[in-house]
Image (spheres, rainbow, N blue to C red):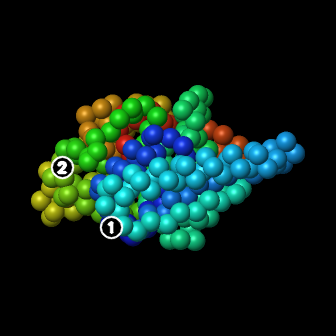
Amino acid sequence: MIPPKNVMVCAVKSDRIVRAAKYIASIFSNAVYHIVAVIPRYNARYFLTSLYSRTLKRIAEEAIYDLEIALAEHRVLSMRSAILEGKPANELLDYAKKHNVDLVVLTAAASPSPIVRVVGSVTRSFIRYSKSVVFVHPMTITSIHIPPKISRILFVSRARVPSEVYDRALKLTIHIAKSFNSEIVVAHVIKHEEEEKLLNTIKSHLSQENIRFSIDVLRPKSRDEEVELILELAKYVDVSIQIRAHGIIARVSKILPFWTRSLMPCEIVAGLSTVPIFFV
């Protein structure tokens, strides 16, 4: 739902997640904010000592407290918190589904240097499997404007996605554009000529809303080229909104488990982008 009614912030002890939460609260202060931390569960005996458990719980409580203070400073009046135990990606995905979360706030990775994978496992799982809008604070950003200064928005659209996903992405883009009087840069990724037809629908919607916009048609020949084109366009905007291919991601992951070891273009962009990103 746009604007979101329920926002979940994935709590870790990190300045990046605090900045990301402040950024979202500056745009959507009227939502209910769920601040959720997960304590990983390990099988090895030495990980089950009472001291280790207490330490992890204390770190989770501190992370939640930092976020509560940050959100309160940005006039968020409704907050809920929870500390869960288990596999972080699974627990957070389940929580988001049970509580009808509209928007999830994450950093690209909990670790300051995810190295080879570019994005962490929790962020990767949300980008692939969550039906919620996912906001990612990339690792490459050292600071973001708070309150946001959004003069240009990059809207990355794709053909062959469910109509409800396209509608949600466009509503989010229009909502932010109107709130900040922004220009929208539409980057439409196509693999076949017939996929250009969606551009007429996008032009029609944006024209009716009296929003300034421009359109770039991207015809990448490979995953790497698609990533390079999107990252280049992102250098000249303040925030990016990208459509994911929900159905394709879910179906292929189940049929070809080994495929999950490779990264989708949107996941690479999440780790390397120079601007914050909403994935729809």
Among the two numbered marks 2 and 1 on one chain, the one whose residue lies closer to the N terminus: 1
Residue shown at 16%/63% (left/top)? 209
The CA span between labels 2 and 1 is 21 Å
Element type at marker 2?
Answer: loop
Q: Is residue 57 above or below residue 6?
A: above
Q: Secondary structure at mark 1?
A: loop
The percent position of residue 241, horizontal first and vertical second, equals: 35, 50
* Image height of 188 relative to 94, above or below: above
> In the rendered structure, which amino acid carries the disc numbered 1?
Asn
Amino acid at dot 2:
Ser
Q: Nearer the viewer, residue 278 or 184?
A: 278
Apparent side of residue 264 relative to residue 168 in the rendered image (left or right): right
Task: Indicate left or right for 10 with 278 as reference.
Answer: right
Q: Is residue 246 found left or right of 216 in the rendered image? A: right
Identity of the residue drawn at 70% across and 57% down:
85
* Residue at image point 58% right, 71% down: 98
Residue 163 drawn at (x, y percent): 39, 66
- Asked if 141 appears above or below 101 in the picture, the reply is above
Foreground label between 2 and 1: 1
Q: Residue at x 35, y 35 (%)?
A: 143
Q: Residues within 10 Å of mark 1 (few under 14, many from 20)?
A: some
Q: Nearer the viewer, residue 193 or 263?
A: 263
Identify the residue position indicated by label 1 in the image: 30
Quarter of the rendering occupied by the C terminus: bottom left
| Residue bearing mark 2 | 182
Whole-percent x, y for residue 63 in the image: 53, 49
Q: Nearer the viewer, residue 175 or 256?
A: 175
The mark tally for this picture is 2
